Image: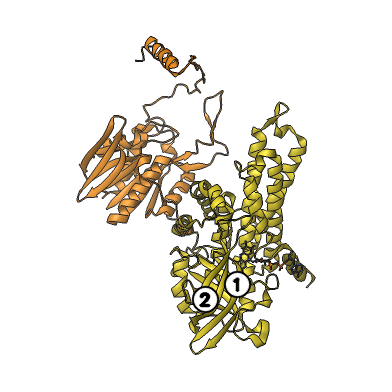
Chain colours: A yellow, B orange
Amino acid sequence: MNFKLSDAHAMLQKVAREFAEKEVAPLAAELDLTGEFPRETFEKMAKCGFTGIGTPIEYGGSGADDLAKAVVVTEIARKCAATAATLSIHSIFPSVIMKFGTEEQKAKYLPLCADGGKLSAFALTEPNAGSDAGAVKTMAILEGDEYVLNGTKCFISGGGQAEYLIIFALTDPAKGLKGLSAIIVERGTPGFSIGKIEEKMGIRASETVELIFDNCRVPKENLVGKEGKGFNIAMTALDGARIGVAAQALGIAEEALDEAVKYMKERVQFGKPLTALQGLNWYIAEMATKVEAAKWMVYNAAFLKQSGQPFTKEAAMAKLYASETAMFVTNLSLQIHGGYGYMKDYPLERMLRDAKITEIYEGTSEIHKVVIARAVLG
Amino acid sequence: MKIIVCVKQVPDTNEVRINQETGTLIRDGVPSIINPDDKNAIEGALALKDIHGGHVTVLSMGPPQAKEALKEALAMGADEAVLLSDRAFAGSDTWATSTILAAAIEAIGGYDIIFCGRQAIDGDTAQVGPETAEFLNIPQVTYAKHIKAVGDRVQITRYTEYGDYVIEAKMPLLLTAIKELNEPRFPSVRGIFKAYSTDDVKVWTLDDLKIDMTQIGLKGSPTNVFRSFVPVKEKNSLIIEGQNGKEKAAALINKLTDLKLV
Ligand SMILES: Cc1cc2nc3c(=O)[nH]c(=O)nc-3n(C[C@H](O)[C@H](O)[C@H](O)COP(=O)(O)OP(=O)(O)OC[C@H]3O[C@@H](n4cnc5c(N)ncnc54)[C@H](O)[C@@H]3O)c2cc1C
């Protein structure tokens, strides 16, 4: 047992930290105000190979492993949760193609997603299918050589900017869940349009949109895996993606803790820095302990996944715990900052708003408890 | 084009504290980094390679842990790395260091350009580059802020506080880079994992070099440091008072004239 990042992972962490400080941090507050997609930053992340982590080198990727992905997402999230969310969610599509796609699909899509700077998205949720992902109503009916898509997806991250999307739709509505399939849709396909663009509380630069399919025709080669395997593919994808959300939460929590420590050393009240106040020191002790625990849970889930062991339970635990930690730590860090924490001159109010999403998307905390309980009770 | 870049691993002086009693750096727990100007030198070399093709070797003299800096340079895109590490090299000043670097560069051979950073943040001498060029007996252009290779020559914009010089020199030559030269690239993920998957940093010791022992190490170093100390920070600010801007400006002029500064 060796609780230490390898030299390569440590170097990657250092590089990602430098990248985040130089390329991500200066934009974070502005992106939060404008809600603009940081395309330039995304392209820079592609150049460094961050978007290609997990995609094998022969498909234009960076190689590397799940721990590398978690380390990078964490470092980016420290400075801008929205940018980290974009990176993390983008990586779902290539991982699905890698695992379930045909050789043609891999050759076509992986290089563009890995280091080609093309964004991708994952579209499962519908107005009536949130936690109950099996209630999807969007249809994809085979007509000749094409699937014809009809329906609406909602709350899709990056759906408006993504070049490629993986859509979960019923190819055989009579079979219900067993008729669900995964299909690739490319941006600009006739019959596919963007509906409502959501105004939201946090991760504002990660755009969340509605997707509308109105007789949208895609070639039947766009089917990923077999017909009827959609639910299985979606759940497998979300298993892995949970580690990404946990890493986002970890990054937010780490940064909020560091901000609290810095502020307590600087801020003087009653003639002494805040560090002289035991009540606040206890906050720091609790925050630091949770951050430490969350970190090892994230690393452990990533390690289990990349070494081919079962990881569903551990990934769910890491996501549940890290996201609760992000809420706990940003809330207390803001509290330690007093009135200043409530102001936009400091990053805490943004971080608190950003942290909240990690308890909701890619499965709510409650759903994660369902998953964990099922695994524990057997 | 064959380029050799000399790099030094230094403590990150942003995080360094000084022992007020001994005047020495407290290095414990301070992260090591590639000397910032040297990073510009690496980028300069890689940018030339991007345009003209070729081969970039990074060369460092230092203790075994300086391998880290070389791995980072490999991850940025350098092709080959050589670490010069031997107890006999310890305590070398700029003369001894450039003697060793020049010997290693001769051993590598066949180079077109030697790149160094302007100066190291832990010593600030800016001597190693120029001295190395002297030992190699090749032209040197320091403070390069722009470079362009044309045929067998390099055009360099050399930055000085009096103005820029545009200089052309024939290869082989030695250049020292300043931060204005470029924006160093980030090492890529692929580069990082490649650099660590193989142990491709060559380590050379004294035995690998043709070198005059009397010119290196602590004994071969003509520089003696008698004492190092932290200058006492004095804050002698003077606030110029006056009714309005005009009055304050007049008072300022008087003061500067008194001090014979204008
Ligand atoms: C900013 C943002 C980005 C998103 N991005 C994407 C995306 O890119 N792709 C995508 O497909 N989806 C995306 N989503 C959708 C997200 O995954 C869902 O919102 C989430 O799964 C919850 O579904 P819901 O909103 O319908 O809530 P509901 O499922 O209606 O949940 C309501 C409440 O009931 C609880 N609940 C529901 N079922 C149970 C149960 N069985 N046991 C206990 N409690 C339960 C929930 O935990 C919650 O508290 C995004 C959402 C947001 C807000």
Pointer 1: residues within 10 angstroms few (<14), some, or many (20+)?
many
Quick check: marks 2 and 1 in contact, CB under 8 Å? no
Residues beneath discs 2 and 1 located on the same chain: yes
- Considering the numbered disc 1 on the image, is that residue within a helix, a strand or a loop? strand
> Vertical placement of B133 versus B18: above or below?
below
Q: Tell me, yes or no, if residue B54 can be seen here.
A: no
Residue drawn at the location 58% of the way across and 56% of the way down: A204
Q: Give the quarter of the image for residue A259.
A: top right
Percent position of residue A373, x then y: 77, 68
| Between A224 and A297, the one nearer to me in the picture | A224
| Percent coordinates x, y for residue B153 in the rendering | 21, 46
**Residue closest to the eye, A350 or B26:** A350
Residue A184's disc is: 2
> Ligand 1 is found in which quarter of the picture?
bottom right
Residue at 45% across / 21% down in the picture?
A: B226
- The number of numbered badges drawn on the structure is 2
Q: Residue furthest right?
A: A377
Q: Is residue A335 visible?
A: yes
Residue at 47% across, 63% down: A62
Please state if A366 lies on the left or on the right of B251 as rendered. Answer: right
Q: Which residue is mark 1?
A: A153
Q: Numbered disc 2: what chain?
A: A
Q: Which of the image's four quarters has the C terminus of chain B?
A: top left
Nearest the eye: A235 or B59: A235
Where A149 sits versus A47, above or below? below
Residue at the extreme top: B258
Q: Distance between the Cα atoms at labels 2 and 1?
A: 14 Å
Disc 1, ligand 1: is the CB inside 8 Å? yes
Residue A119 to residue A102: above or below: above
| Disc 2, SS | strand
